[in-house]
Amino acid sequence: MEVLRRHMEELGEHDIGWLAALKDPMVGKALQFLHGDLAHPWTVERLGRCVGLSRSALADRFRYLLREPPMQYLTRWRLQTAAQRLRDSDEGIAAIAAEVGYESEAAFNRAFKRHVGKPPATWRSGARARKLSLTNN
């Protein structure tokens, strides 16, 4: 933790990346909101209001620091979180979809397949088989 803390203290205003984004007062706050309530129906406008910036100012700052727009980041984070839940829990796909902000299982299935290349159920089976083979070796 101390190494991370020192590294973040040494970051300059022109540095980019996830740690620089966390250190940024507005983008860091936006990331806290996104990570704190993944299922919330976020928009860039709503997120901007939460952190005290206009939609365009937040989008520009977010894109500069993280090299992707806020909603693209949110989608990627939601799907990474869902993949972890699929691999590590027995929760149903619809429940996981709702936890990460998808209103329907069908929309979640389409997004997951687009991101991962396989539907959630197929990916879950393969991920569990890989996890089991790793623990048995």
Image (spheres, grey):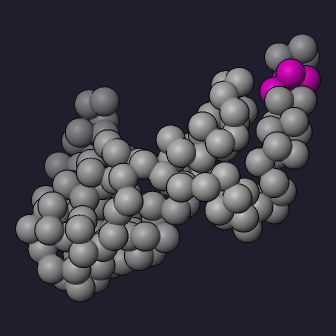
Measuring 66% from the left and 28% from the top, which residue is drawn there? 91
Residue 57 position, x and y percent, is 19, 82
Q: In the rendered view of the protein, which quadrant contains the N terminus?
A: top left
- Which of the 4 image quarters holds residue 19? bottom left
Whether residue 83 sits left or right of residue 68 in the image: it is right
Measuring 15% from the left and 61% from the top, which residue is drawn there? 50
- Magenta stretch containing residue 98, yes or no? no
Measuring 54% from the left and 55% from the top, which residue is drawn there? 102
- Which of the 4 image quarters holds residue 16? bottom left
Residue 135 position, x and y percent, is 83, 17
Is residue 20 visible in the rendered image? The answer is: no
Q: Nearer the viewer, residue 31 or 12?
A: 31
Q: In the rendered view of the protein, which quadrant contains the C terminus?
A: top right
Whether residue 69 sits left or right of residue 111 in the image: it is left
Residue 93 position, x and y percent, is 69, 40
Q: Nearer the viewer, residue 50 or 69?
A: 50
Q: Is residue 16 above or below residue 2?
A: below
Q: Is residue 135 above or below residue 103?
A: above
- Which range is magenta? 130-134
Whether residue 17 sits left or right of residue 122 in the image: it is left
